């Protein structure tokens, strides 16, 4: 299907002469309807998202980003920003407007001596891991290698190293960003301090981040993998998991999941990663692994990039997705039982329900030190509904919403920005917690017209 053409926000079609003027100044690739790459360019990982941009601006560098921002602002064009395109809500795409696509900007420079890395905004987690692992170093990121580093970082960033080294955003030393007025700024502890604060958890509200400077940590070989149990042991396993995590060392992250084995058999899984010394990891994991007789215990030493891609198969491109997520006040017996009861009624074997325990280093940062406010949170619940038949969409979405509603009595009132699908403003506001008003002030300064609003939006009052 062809693009419906590039239009301004008032619905008027932009003339070909304006687009050609942009093309002449652009060094990357402009893709529009009828071009060979258009259908590929408008697809993202979540097949539930079906949008038709007027133009996809595949930027070759920062100058292209500036050209695209200036063009869109001057012509009143809707803008979406694409890094990895892995956000479940599809915020990387729009209808009739411009997608500023960073996917070709994947440059990574590792300064091993000073444990720093400069990463462009189109890089995926797997790209970063490949380069840093060469030096026995790592950035604390997420758990799926196909995730874009930009969206993950701007939303906080939680993964296998969060308990030892904090959130991804806690490990950013500086940002290079193109703001709505087309300026290129550096945000750091020394420059544009208010923007530096806001970008660490404030989402894509303040501009297009073209590169990130990260602090690196000594992580090379980890002890990790999956332990699987029959689904009928879920109550015992989740209670054991809850008690075990109360005294787990910071080096150890463990998530619990209610999912299906490759043959469709429902199971309960514990997924662990210990990033310290292997002997210490064996000792730390011993009590967790001592529960009953699992169907499989695949805990083993592995290179960190392998750990980072271990769950990739559970998030395939081309599946339809609809997610609900929230932080829990606690993981009590009633909450556990509600999770199990609803997970057992899942309508698709591709669906997974995940409980992620945080704490550790991330919880020792003050709520106001970065824009990511929910430092006291322990458990995050993710209801990750996936299916393949579009005709099933109403039933799958209804099941997910019903599950989320049943869990509402156990919610803390906080949400993880990176896990949010399409949500109402009240939920998005709650995801920013006590920092929302301060974020509005930063939005007023750097994007008073809300030029960047296809995100978990912070509305300016200026």
Image: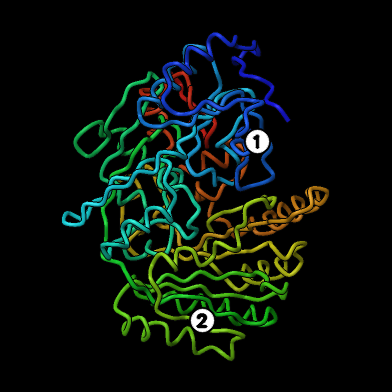
| Quarter residue 236 falls in | bottom right
How far across and down, in percent of the image, does residue 268 sit?
A: 62, 75
Residue at x-position 77% and y-position 62%: 347
Residue 158 disc label:
none
**Distance CA(mark 1)–CA(mark 2):** 40 Å
Relative to 286, is 346 above or below? above
User: 410 or 68: nearer the eye?
Assistant: 68
How far across and down, in percent of the image, does residue 331 sit?
A: 55, 68
Residue at x-position 40% and y-position 56%: 141
Q: List the single residue furthest toward the left.
A: 113
Residue at x-position 49% and y-position 18%: 72
User: 153 or 120: nearer the eye?
Assistant: 120
Q: Quadrant of the N terminus?
A: top right
In this figure, which residue is indicated by the disc labeled 1? 39
Picture colour scheme: rainbow
Circle 2 sits in a helix, a strand or a loop, which is it? loop
Q: Quadrant of the C terminus?
A: top left
Dot 2 crowding, Cα within 10 Å, few <14, some 14–19, many 20+: few
Which mark is in front, 1 or 2? Answer: 1
Q: Of callouts 1 and 2, which one flags the residue occurring earlier in the amino acid sequence?
A: 1
Is 362 positioned to the left or the right of 329 in the image? left
Residue at x-position 36% and y-position 35%: 210
Relative to 400, is 226 above or below? below
| Quarter residue 37 falls in | top right
Q: List the single residue furthest toward the front.
A: 36
Is 112 positioned to the left or the right of 460 in the image? left
In this figure, which residue is indicated by the disc labeled 2? 298
How far across and down, in percent of the image, does residue 24 sit?
A: 45, 16
Is 239 positioned to the left or the right of 142 in the image? right
Is 20 positioned to the left or the right of 344 in the image? left
Circle 1 sits in a helix, a strand or a loop, which is it? helix
């Amino acid at each position: 299907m062809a693009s419906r053409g590039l239009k301004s926000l008032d619905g008027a079609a932009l003339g070909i002469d304006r687009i050609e003027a942009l093309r002449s100044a652009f060094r990357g690739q402009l893709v529009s309807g009828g071009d060979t790459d258009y259908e590929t360019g408008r697809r993202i990982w979540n097949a539930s998202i079906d949008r038709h941009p007027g133009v996809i601006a595949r930027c070759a560098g920062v100058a292209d980003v500036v050209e695209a921002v200036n063009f869109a602002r001057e012509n009143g064009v809707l803008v979406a920003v694409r890094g990895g395109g892995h956000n479940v809500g599809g915020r990387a795409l729009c209808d009739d407007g411009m997608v500023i696509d960073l996917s070709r900007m994947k440059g990574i420079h590792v300064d091993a001596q000073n444990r720093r890395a400069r990463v462009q905004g189109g890089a995926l987690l797997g790209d970063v891991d490949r380069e840093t692992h060469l030096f026995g170093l790592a950035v604390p990121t997420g758990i799926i290698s196909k995730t874009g580093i930009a969206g993950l970082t701007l939303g906080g960033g939680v993964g296998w190293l969060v308990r030892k080294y904090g959130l991804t955003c806690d490990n950013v030393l500086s940002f290079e960003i193109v703001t709505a007025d087309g300026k290129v700024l550096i945000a750091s502890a020394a420059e544009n301090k208010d923007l530096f604060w806001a970008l660490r958890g404030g989402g894509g509200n303040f501009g297009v981040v073209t590169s990130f400077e990260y602090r690196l940590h000594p992580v090379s070989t980890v002890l990790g993998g999956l332990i699987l149990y029959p689904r009928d042991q879920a109550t015992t396993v989740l209670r054991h998991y809850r008690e075990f995590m109360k005294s787990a060392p910071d080096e150890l992250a463990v998530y619990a999941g209610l999912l299906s084995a490759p043959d469709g058999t429902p199971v309960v899984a514990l997924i662990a990663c210990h990033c310290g010394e292997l002997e210490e990891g064996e000792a730390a994991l011993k009590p967790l692994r001592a529960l009953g007789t699992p169907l499989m215990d695949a805990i083993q030493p592995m290179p960190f990039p392998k750990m980072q891609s271990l769950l990739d198969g559970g998030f395939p491109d081309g599946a339809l997705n609809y997610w609900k997520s929230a932080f829990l006040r606690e993981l009590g017996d009633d909450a556990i039982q509600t999770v199990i009861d609803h997970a057992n009624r899942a309508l698709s074997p591709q669906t997974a329900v995940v409980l992620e325990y945080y704490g550790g280093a991330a919880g020792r940062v003050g709520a106001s030190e970065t824009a990511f406010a929910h430092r006291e949170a322990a458990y995050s619940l993710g209801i990750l509904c996936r299916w393949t038949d579009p005709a099933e969409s109403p039933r799958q979405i209804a099941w997910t919403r019903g599950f989320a509603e049943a869990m509402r009595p156990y919610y803390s009132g906080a949400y993880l920005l990176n896990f949010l699908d399409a949500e109402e403003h009240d939920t998005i506001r709650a995801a920013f917690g006590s920092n929302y008003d301060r974020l509005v002030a930063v939005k007023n300064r750097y994007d008073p017209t809300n030029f960047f609003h296809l995100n978990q939006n912070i509305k300016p009052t200026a």
